[in-house]
Structures are given as structure tokens and as C-alpha cells.
Image: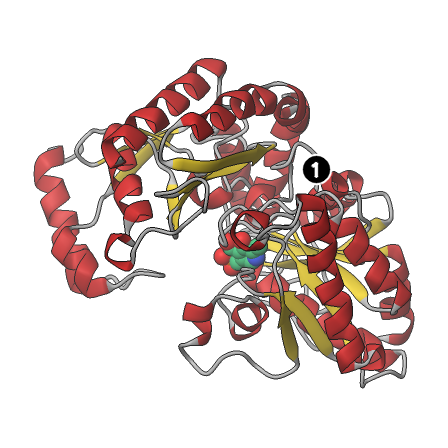
């Protein structure tokens, strides 16, 4: 028997305010405002404790590829935990789920990538590549190759390594970051930073900033370049088409490894299994998390290319790194059941050929709204830039600087989760979104823009 909803909201809010510290939040401000309590989810909707039904336009936190309430995944986790709740993968042991999942991921990964290291989430995956890559170069007799190149306004997680590789200024301002050995370069954010340049010229310019950084540091000192195929948390920044191939060429010419952080793009978000394929490049390593389990259980990892794996396995010896929950049986069962659904329902194809194009066509029309400077979307990942002046792409004045947040709050009240980044709104709905739900999503977005305007 469940307690009456209205009383419960006040109860949970009070407990939360008294005891719960939230990630990426100002606790004082949050407590004054009153946190929203989400109690249930089904399909593409979440429900709050007051009974409001809200379209989950962010797939939780970019993770719910197959949608909410999938009993097959829940049952697979339960069955696995009844059979084997936990054992480690450290000491000369594995378990069927870990072996099967490593194979299943190799199956959908780019053809040249066939080994997987497991973590509990994305930040740990990023820390893993940091250590793995440096260890690789040291094992090959090149320990001086240790510098990582990453981008300003990139997001690579919240651990010391991840937040350092990330280029988020507010994160670097806290906790003594970034750690040494990282160079941040320009991001391929044409709308905000392209100036008078064409998209294509700007794509080449941003890629050549990578070359410049490597050459200045000396390629003999540079281990790897890491970037998100599409920057997610930075504002769904879809680079010009020539950017990634040029970055790949630059890295190859300088013997610098290429790492795609696919924590958001991986497992179908762009309409390909991996964003690297969408961008037309072959990375040496891929970090993943989120969509691999559709969020039903925490699991992430690193997919390793054959060339890298060969050197790493042949010369690396002991890799002194790992997590208690590397290859947790529950996570592996969730991922296997999730991938089964994605295969059976052909969800990646659906994103590429059906619901992706359907939503894109309608989403891009939002650029006709007086407040929207640009609307962009590929696969099921998109953004719109709000501006008071479309011609100059001006930002709102500082006192209006919360326009994105105002828009987000209207959105929530109107029954749609979108996320605010600066003056932009971003979107990444589940792959199971129906055409009717896409229509509802876009109609709500129009309504929300009118309210914000
Ligand atoms: N890398 C990217 C590209 C991400 O978007 C995220 C999270 O959003 C992470 C890493 C960190 O993943 P996690 O939050 O699972 O640690």
C-alpha cells in the first residue's frame, strides 16, 4: 500500500533538504525552491510525486535508449543476481555475463575494435583511458609520450582525471584542477565561435588548433587526443563534417592516439552504433557508459582497438588499475538484455531512418521562432540556441543570463524535460519515441518558447 501522494511530496522534500547533497547543485538554492520528486517512469514518460506526467526529452541523463519500464531488463538483472550477485574479475576469474558482454560489445563496435575493459560509469572509463594510454606508451619505451590534448567546454566526467580532461571552467575552479599534462584547445562550436568563417573553414581551423597544440608540445611528448564526437553537456555541439576526419589525419601523422568519448554518442544516439562511425573516423579507444545499459544498472568501460590491444597485451604486463564493480554481474546482465532489445527492435536503424529524421524535420523548424537563432539535430541529439538578436547571435545580457533556465522551468511545467546550457536548450529523447510523442514534444517546445519570449 502506498502513502497518499500529496503528503509524500512534502515528506520526501523535507528528508531530501535535511540530508541529501545533490550533484551539480547549489543545495541552499535547491532547498529554498523545493526539489521535484520523480517516483515512476514508463516508456518515454516520467511521473512526479504529484502525479504530473512529463515527457523525458533527456532520456534521464542521456542514457535511456530503450525507454523506461522494460521488464525484460529488470528481470534479467534479478535473475542474474539470484544466480550470482557479485564476484570480481580481478584475480584470474571472470563470469559468463562479463565474457558474453565483452563479446557482444565487440560485435557492435567498429570492426577494428575487439577488446573491452569494464568500469562502473563514464568518469571511471575516462580515468581508465588516461592511465591505460600512458601505460601503453611507457610499455613501448616512450614514457615521455604522456600529454593529453582535449577541448575547452568538453565534458569527460567528474573524477580528478575526467574533470581535468574536460574543459569546463566552473569545474576547474573547484578542487585544484586540472591535473598536469593536459592541454585544452579550441572546440568546434561554429554557432558561437565561428565568427565570419564558413562552417567548413571553421571546421578546419578548429582541427588545426589540435595540430598546433601537438606541434608546440612536441609530438614525441603527446600521448593522445580525446574528444566527444558531439559535445553533449557542453551544449550538443555538432562539429562541421570535416572536423573529425582532419583531427584523425593530424593525429595519425604525429603518432598520437585518437580517443572518442562516446559516453553520450555511443550505443546509437547518432543513428550509428558509435559517433565515431557517424563522423567517419577510426579511433584507437572508445569510452562508453549510459546507453549500454539504458541506465538500468551503472556500467561503463573502454573499447580498445586491435592495434592498441596488441601492444598493450604484448608489452604491458600487469595493468595496475580496476574497480570493484568492473564487470558487475548485474550490469552485464542489464547491458546484455538492453542490447537484445536494441537488436530485436532495430532501434539504431530506427534512429537513423525513422524517428530521427521525423523529429529532426520538426525540431529544425523551431529556428523560425523569434527567440531561436539556430536549431540543430542529428540522430536523436539536438539543441537550440536562444538569442535576443539572430543576426549578431548575441547572448542575453547578464541580468537576463538565466534565459535558458527560465525556458527549462517552463518546459518542465508544460510537461517536457529539456536541459538548459547557457542560453540554449538541449534534447536527447529515448529511441522508442513514437511519431505522436515527437509531435507532442515539438508542440510543447513551441509553447515553452512563447512563454519564455
Ligand atoms: N564523458 C562524457 C562524454 C559524458 O557525457 C559523461 C557524463 O555525462 C561522462 C564522461 C561521465 O560519465 P559518468 O557520469 O557516468 O561518470
Q: Nearer the viewer, residue 115 or 362?
A: 362
- Taking the image as shown, residue 102 lies to the left or right of residue 362, namely right
Who's the residue at 70% across and 77% down the image? 320
Q: Nearer the viewer, residue 325 or 400?
A: 400
Q: Secondary structure at mark 1?
A: loop
Asked if residue 283 is positioned above or below residue 371 in the image, the reply reads below
Q: Quadrant of the N terminus?
A: top left
**Residue 296: % across, % down:** 49, 42
Asked whether the viewer can see residue 317, the reply is no
**Residue 105: % across, % down:** 73, 44
Q: Residue furthest top?
A: 436
Q: Is mark 1 within 8 Å of ligand 1?
A: no
Question: Circle 1 sits on which residue?
Answer: 273
Who's the residue at 42% across and 19% down the image? 437
**Residue 424: % across, % down:** 41, 45
Crowding around mark 1 (Cα neighbors within 10 Å: few <14, some 14 to 19, many 20+) is some
Asked if residue 91 is positioned above or below residue 2 in the image, the reply reads below
- Taking the image as shown, residue 12 lies to the left or right of residue 396, namely left
**Residue 18: % across, % down:** 15, 63
Q: Residue furthest left?
A: 7
Asked if residue 423 is positioned above or below residue 69 in the image, the reply reads below
Q: Nearer the viewer, residue 322 or 136?
A: 136
Q: Quadrant of the C terminus?
A: top left
Who's the residue at 26% across and 36% down the image? 452
Asked if residue 27 is positioned above or below residue 66 in the image, the reply reads below
- Taking the image as shown, residue 217 lies to the left or right of residue 452, namely right
Amino acid at each position: 500500500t502506498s502513502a497518499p501522494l500529496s503528503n509524500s511530496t512534502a515528506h520526501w522534500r523535507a528528508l531530501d533538504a535535511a540530508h541529501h547533497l545533490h550533484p551539480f547543485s547549489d543545495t541552499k538554492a535547491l532547498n529554498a525552491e523545493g526539489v521535484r520528486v520523480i517516483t515512476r517512469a514508463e516508456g518515454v514518460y516520467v511521473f512526479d510525486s504529484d502525479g504530473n506526467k512529463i515527457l523525458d526529452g533527456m532520456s534521464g541523463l542521456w542514457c535511456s535508449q530503450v525507454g523506461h519500464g522494460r521488464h525484460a531488463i529488470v528481470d534479467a538483472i534479478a535473475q542474474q543476481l539470484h544466480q550470482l550477485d557479485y564476484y570480481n574479475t580481478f584475480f584470474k576469474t571472470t563470469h559468463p555475463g562479463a565474457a558474453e558482454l565483452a563479446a557482444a560489445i565487440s560485435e557492435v563496435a567498429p570492426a577494428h575494435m575487439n577488446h573491452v575493459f569494464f568500469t562502473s560509469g563514464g568518469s571511471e572509463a575516462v580515468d581508465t583511458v588516461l592511465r591505460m594510454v600512458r601505460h601503453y606508451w611507457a610499455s613501448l619505451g616512450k614514457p615521455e609520450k604522456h600529454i593529453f590534448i582535449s577541448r575547452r567546454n568538453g565534458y569527460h566526467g567528474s573524477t580528478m582525471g575526467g574533470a581535468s580532461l574536460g574543459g569546463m571552467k566552473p569545474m576547474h575552479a573547484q578542487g585544484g584542477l586540472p591535473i598536469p599534462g593536459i592541454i585544452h584547445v579550441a572546440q568546434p562550436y561554429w554557432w558561437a565561435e565561428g565568427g565570419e568563417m564558413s562552417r567548413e573553414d571553421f571546421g578546419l581551423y578548429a582541427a588545426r588548433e589540435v595540430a598546433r597544440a601537438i606541434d608546440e608540445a612536441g609530438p614525441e611528448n603527446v600521448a593522445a587526443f580525446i574528444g566527444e564526437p558531439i559535445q553533449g553537456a557542453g551544449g550538443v555541439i555538432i562539429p562541421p563534417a570535416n572536423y573529425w576526419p582532419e583531427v584523425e589525419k593530424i593525429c595519425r601523422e604525429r603518432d598520437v592516439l585518437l580517443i572518442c568519448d562516446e559516453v553520450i554518442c555511443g550505443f546509437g544516439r547518432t543513428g550509428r552504433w558509435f559517433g565515431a562511425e557517424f563522423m567517419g573516423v577510426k579511433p584507437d579507444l572508445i569510452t562508453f557508459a549510459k546507453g549500454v545499459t539504458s541506465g538500468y544498472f551503472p556500467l561503463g568501460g573502454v573499447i580498445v582497438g586491435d592495434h592498441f590491444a596488441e601492444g598493450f597485451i604484448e608489452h604491458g604486463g600487469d595493468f595496475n588499475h580496476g574497480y570493484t564493480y568492473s564487470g558487475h554481474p548485474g550490469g552485464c546482465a542489464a547491458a546484455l538484455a538492453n542490447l537484445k532489445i536494441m537488436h530485436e527492435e532495430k532501434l539504431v536503424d530506427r534512429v537513423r531512418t525513422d524517428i530521427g529524421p521525423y523529429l529532426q524535420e520538426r525540431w529544425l523548424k523551431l529556428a523560425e521562432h523569434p527567440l531561436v537563432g539556430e536549431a540543430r539535430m542529428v540522430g536523436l541529439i539536438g539543441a537550440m540556441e536562444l538569442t535576443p538578436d539572430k543576426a549578431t547571435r548575441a547572448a542575453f545580457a547578464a541580468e537576463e543570463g538565466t534565459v535558458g533556465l527560465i525556458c527549462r522551468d517552463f518546459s518542465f511545467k508544460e510537461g517536457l524535460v529539456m536541459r538548459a546550457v547557457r542560453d540554449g536548450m538541449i534534447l536527447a529523447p529515448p529511441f522508442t519515441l513514437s511519431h505522436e510523442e515527437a509531435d507532442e514534444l515539438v508542440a510543447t517546445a513551441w509553447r515553452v518558447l512563447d512563454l519564455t519570449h
